[in-house]
Image (spheres, rainbow, N blue to C red):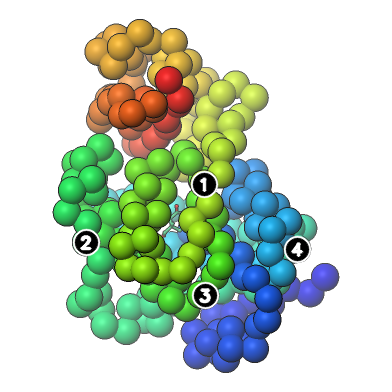
Amino acid sequence: MKIELIRDLQQWQKVRQSLKGEVGFVPTMGALHTGHASLLKRAREENDVVILSIYVNPTQFNDPKDLEKYPQTLEADLEVARQHGVDYVIAPTYAQIYPDGYRFKVTENQFSNELCGAHRPGHFDGVLTVVMKLFNLVRPMRAYFGEKDFQQLSLIRDMAKTFFMDIDVVPCPTLREADGLAMSSRNVHLAPSDRTKAPRFHDVLVSAKSTEEARDRLQREGFVVDYVEDRENRRLSAVKLGNVRLIDNVER
Ligand code: PAF
C-alpha cells in the first residue's frame, strides 16, 4: 500500500481538509520500535484513517547532547508505517512547527514540575506545546500514547480536557523486551554491560517493598536514581545508566 510522506504543513492542511471518517493519530519522535508498532496497530484497528507524525522536538530536550544523539531512522520508520497500514506520515521541520520561534507555549504548573519534570526543566512545556500543535494540525478523534511515559500521558490527557479538545487520549500498555526492559528508542545507546544490567530496573521496581528499598537496591546495582515514587496505584521511576536515562513504571 502506498504511504504518503508529507513534510510541508500547508500541503498537510489541505490533505487534512479532504479526509473523511474517524482519524487516529500516533505522535512520535521516530526511531520506531515494537512499542510504537503496537500503537499503530491499535490505531489501525480503531480508525478509518491513521496518521503518524515523526518529529524530534527540540523544545522538549533540556540536554542538547541528548537531542544531538537522538536516533533518526526515517527509512526504517517508513517501512514500519507501511507494514502497519499508516495512511499519512507527517514529518515537518522546526521552522514549520515553530513559526513563532517558540514564543508561545503550553505550561502546566503543578504535576509537570514533579517526577521527570523536576529533573528536566522545561521538558513538559516542550512536550505539551508540540502535542497541542500536532493535535490542532491533525484534528484526530483518537490519539495513542504509551504508558511507559506515564507522566506525559497524564499531562496530555489533562491538557486535552482542560482546553476542551474533542480528542480521546488512548493509553496503551508498555511493551517490554523478553528480559523485562521497557522498549525505548534510547535503549540502542546502552553500552553492552549496561544493556545486561538494565532489566534489573524493572525487576527492582516490581519486587521492592518500598520506594526506599527500590532506591537503595538500584543504587547498589550501579543505577543513578533520579526518583522512585509511589503515586496512586503505580510506582514510577527514572534512572541513569551511563549516559542513558531510562524511565519506567509498574502497577502496584
Ligand atoms: O513520546 C514522544 O515520543 C514525544 O514526547 C511526543 C509525544 C511525540 C512529543 O514530541
- If you read the primary sequence from the N terminus, does the residue marked by circle 3 or circle 1 appear first? 3
Image point 59% across, 80% down: which residue? 6
- If you read the primary sequence from the N terminus, does the residue marked by circle 4 or circle 2 appear first? 4
Q: Secondary structure at mark 3?
A: helix
Quarter of the image for residue 136 reads bottom left
Q: Amino acid at mark 4?
A: Gly
Image point 25% across, 60% down: which residue? 125
* Circle 3/circle 1 CB separation < 8 Å: no
Q: Quadrant of ligand 1?
A: bottom left
Q: Does any portion of residue 220 appear in the rendered image?
A: no
Q: Nearer the viewer, mark 1 or mark 4?
A: 1
C-alpha gap between disc 4 and disc 3: 17 Å
The residue that label 2 is drawn on is 107
x and y percent of residue 209 in the render? 35, 8
- If you read the primary sequence from the N terminus, does the residue marked by circle 3 or circle 2 appear first? 2
Image point 40% across, 41% down: which residue? 150
The residue that label 3 is drawn on is 138
What numbered label is drawn on residue 171? Answer: 1
Q: Amino acid at mark 2?
A: Thr
Assign the C terminus to one quadrant of the image.
top left
Q: Amino acid at mark 3?
A: Val
